[in-house]
Image: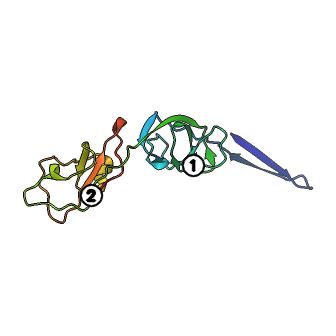
Amino acid sequence: TDYTATVVSDRGCSTSQTVSISNSVANAPTASDQAFCGSVDVVNIVVGSETGATLKWFDSVSPTTPITVINTSGTYYVSQAIGTCESTQTAVSIAINARPDAPTGTSPQGFNEGQTVSSIVMDQANVTWYNSNANAQSGQNPLAQSTPLVNGTTYYGVIIGQKGCPSSSFE
C-alpha cells in the first residue's frame, strides 16, 4: 500500500513524499501426525516451513511459552515466525509410544573363543544386540545371533516393544 505525506510550511510551501508499506504475513507451517518413542525434542518433528523461519511449538491453542520437548501424546500446535511476523498455528497430533523396560542380566560376562552373540545370557529371551548404543536406539544394524564375540568389545542389548520402540540399552 502506498501512503503520501505532505508537509506545508507557514509560508505556504509544500513538499510531498510517497512511501510504500507492505505487511507480509507468514503462512502457517505444514505438518502431518507423527509418532515417537519415549519423548521427542520438537526440533526433530518434521515440519514444512519457509526458509529462514523460526518454528515455535505450544501445548495449547492459547500459547504463553513455547515448549521444547514433548513427553505425552496429544495435539500440539506449531507456528512459524519470519522476522516479527508470526503465522497462525497448525495443529499436529503427536503420539508418544512407551518404551519397554530394559533387559537385565549379568555384566560383564566371560566367554570362550568362538562363542557368538547368542551365547550372551540374559534374563529375557527377546533381546536384540547391536555394536553401538546409537544403533541400538535407532534400530539400525542389529547383530546376527551368529556374530562372533570379540574380547574387550561392548555389546548393547535392547528389547523392541510394541510400535517398534527400543528399551534403554543393556551393556
Task: Find residue 120 and report its horizontal and vertical position in percent.
Answer: 19, 53
Q: Residue most toward the bottom? A: 152
Q: Is residue 21 left or right of residue 51?
A: right
Which amino acid, mark 1? Ile
Q: Residue at horizontal 55%, vertical 38%?
A: 76
Of the image marks 1 and 2, the number of the one nearer the N terminus: 1
Residue 114 location (% of width, % of height) = 7, 57
Name of the residue lying farthest toward the right: 10
Q: Amino acid at mark 2?
A: Thr
- What percent of the width, then of the height, locates residue 147? 13, 51
Q: CA distance from mark 1 to mark 2?
A: 39 Å
Of 137 and 90, nearer the camera is 137
- The image quarter containing residue 87 is top right
Residue 71, horizontal then vertical, whole percent: 51, 45
89 in relation to 66, above or below: above
Tell me, yes or no, whether the two marked residues, 1 and 2, touch with CB atoms within 8 Å: no
For the residue pair 169 and 55, the one nearer the viewer reads as 169
Q: Residue sitting at 52 percent across and 38 percent down?
A: 29
Which residue was labeled with disc 2? 106
Above-or-below relation of 50 to 150 = above
Quarter holding the C terminus is bottom left
Q: Nearer the viewer, residue 128 or 142?
A: 128
Classed neighbour count for the residue bearing mark 1: other residues with Cα under 10 Å, few (<14), some (14–19), many (≥20): some
What residue does disc 1 label? 67
Query: How many C-alpha atoms fall within 10 Å of the one at disc 2: few (<14), some, or many (≥20)?
Result: few
Which SS class for mark 1?
loop
- Placement of 92 over or under 118, stated as above or below: above
Q: Quadrant of residue 9?
A: bottom right
